Image (cartoon, rainbow, N blue to C red):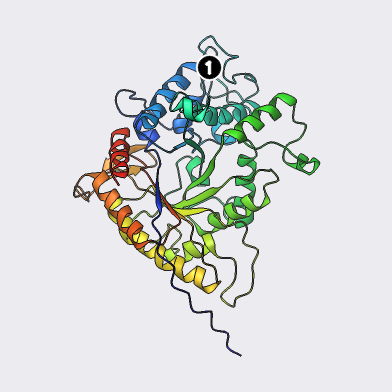
């Protein structure tokens, strides 16, 4: 009896819709007119702006520039938010701008005292602040097409969840060199579930191992937060194990309704491989696969609605997309599945700069001038060629580090001209 996999059927050609994501929030905040310095004293990076009313207003203003540029999806300022990051963030008395009870500042004073005379932020308050990041993203849409879309305004909010390595000091999302307690699929799944539990409401008694006695106010906050989330974005994953961990977590969520989600990976260096040396095929197989090579079903967890690439040089994007297409065709064909996922691409807007995770500075590398042409023109060309091949269900496109609201606005105009 033959054990050869079925021959993939040719996929009928489609014309995927283009959906516009935002750009690089952290690098926007470090640039004029904001000029906010992020150092090792700011382990939360852009999530640091969730702390006080005045900084939250700055965050709203920065994110609103992307909304004004015409994005369809705005990512929350929660990429590097974690309980550990908040516990290491010192809050000096008076940091609340005289308005401690506004926008979720309740719960201060429950953290540990810091080296500089301040104190870290405890878990209860950290959770409120993280949920506040989703609320701020939603508020940025209010007023846009209000007559058509109601009080919340048009547009979708994606809950941004970076890799475990995005929360370490220094960051390890570009290297994938995690500590021994965050290496296996089970370990990483536990960490991701704990962080994600900040945002979704309790629905059953069985969740008491995750959330102990949850007061009524926290429950209401979580319900409102979950309602404001349209997508969950697991971003910049550097290892195959973390991809599998995320799928396991999304499969185990006890809440209804479930939210669509995407997984995007980072491809640093010159080769089209993850930091853990996984090839594009291994990456896509981890993202989409539900069976072994022998055709046996495996418990891989929930399949993401979208897969893709972020925080990667634009010069690598086209070849990565082509490899993703080859791998997706093979994985789906092997399993007799026909529906393709959404392609999600948001490369860096760099022009030769590389990020130093120790100094938290962008430093000019050897590949100066690698972006031969306007960034928006290059990205749009790559996306249009993928669109013309007609494989993906939909294409999400935007920018990551160093991409600006101006860049995103140019992409909007190109999309609107189709």
Task: Say if 130 sits above or below 322 in the image.
Answer: above
Residue 190 seen in the current view: yes
Q: Is residue 194 above or below residue 133?
A: below
Mark yes or no: residue 88 visible: no
Which residue is at the far top?
98
> Could you say which is closer to the camera, residue 45 or residue 139?
139
Locate residue 366, reporting x and y percent.
Answer: 22, 50
Instruction: Locate residue 338, reporting x and y percent.
Output: 51, 66
Q: Residue reaching furthest bottom?
A: 1
Which residue is pictured at 68% across the width and 51% down the height? 252
Along the horizontal axis of the image, is 219 left or right of 87?
A: right
Label tally: 1
Horizontal and vertical percent position of residue 163: 50, 46
Residue at 60% x, 32% y: name it.
225
Toward the right, the furthest residue is 205
Quarter occupied by the N terminus? bottom right
Q: Position of residue 351 (x, y in %)?
A: 24, 44
Image check: 71 left or right of 286? Answer: left
Q: Nearer the viewer, residue 67 or 131?
A: 67
Are there few (<14), some (14-19), or many (20+) residues within 10 Å of tag 1? some
Say left or right for 354 vs 10: left
Q: Nearer the viewer, residue 182 or 16?
A: 16
The residue identified by callout 1 is 92
Disc 1, SS = loop
């Amino acid at each position: 009896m033959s054990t050869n996999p079925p021959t993939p059927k040719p996929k009928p050609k489609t014309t995927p819709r283009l959906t516009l994501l935002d750009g690089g929030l952290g690098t926007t905040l470090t640039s004029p007119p904001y000029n906010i310095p992020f150092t090792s004293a700011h382990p939360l990076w852009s999530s640091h702006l969730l702390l006080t009313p005045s900084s939250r207003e700055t965050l709203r203003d920065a994110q609103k520039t992307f909304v004004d540029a015409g994005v369809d999806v705005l990512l929350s300022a929660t990429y590097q938010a974690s309980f550990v990051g908040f516990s290491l963030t010192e809050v000096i008395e008076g940091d609340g701008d005289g308005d401690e009870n506004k926008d979720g500042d309740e719960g201060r004073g429950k953290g540990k005292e810091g080296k500089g005379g301040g104190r870290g932020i405890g878990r209860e308050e950290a959770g409120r602040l993280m949920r506040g990041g989703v609320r701020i993203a939603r508020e940025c849409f209010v007023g846009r097409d209000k007559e058509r879309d109601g009080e919340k305004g048009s547009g979708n909010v994606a809950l941004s969840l970076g890799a475990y390595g995005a929360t370490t000091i220094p960051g390890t999302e570009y290297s994938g060199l995690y500590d021994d307690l965050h290496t296996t699929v089970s370990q990483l799944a536990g960490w991701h579930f704990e962080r994600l539990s900040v945002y979704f409401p309790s629905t059953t008694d069985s969740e008491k191992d995750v959330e102990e006695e949850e007061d009524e106010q926290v429950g209401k906050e979580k319900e409102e937060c979950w309602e404001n989330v349209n997508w969950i974005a697991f971003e910049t994953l550097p290892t195959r194990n973390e991809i599998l961990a995320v799928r396991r977590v999304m499969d185990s969520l006890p809440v209804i309704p479930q939210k669509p989600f995407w997984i995007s990976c980072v491809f640093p260096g010159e080769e089209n491989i993850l930091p853990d040396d996984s090839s594009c095929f291994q990456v896509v197989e981890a993202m989409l696969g539900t069976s072994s090579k022998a055709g046996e079903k495996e418990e891989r967890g929930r399949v993401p609605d979208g897969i893709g690439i972020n925080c990667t040089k634009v010069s690598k994007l086209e070849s990565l997309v082509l490899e993703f297409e080859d791998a997706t065709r093979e994985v789906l064909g092997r399993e007799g599945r026909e529906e393709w996922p959404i392609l999600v691409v948001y490369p860096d807007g760099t022009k030769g700069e590389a990020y130093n995770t120790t100094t938290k500075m962008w430093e000019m590398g050897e590949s100066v001038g690698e972006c031969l042409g306007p960034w928006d023109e290059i990205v749009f060309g790559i996306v249009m060629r993928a669109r013309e091949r007609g494989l993906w269900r939909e294409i999400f496109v935007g920018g990551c580090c160093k991409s600006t609201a101006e860049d995103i606005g140019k992409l909007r105009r190109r999309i609107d001209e189709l």
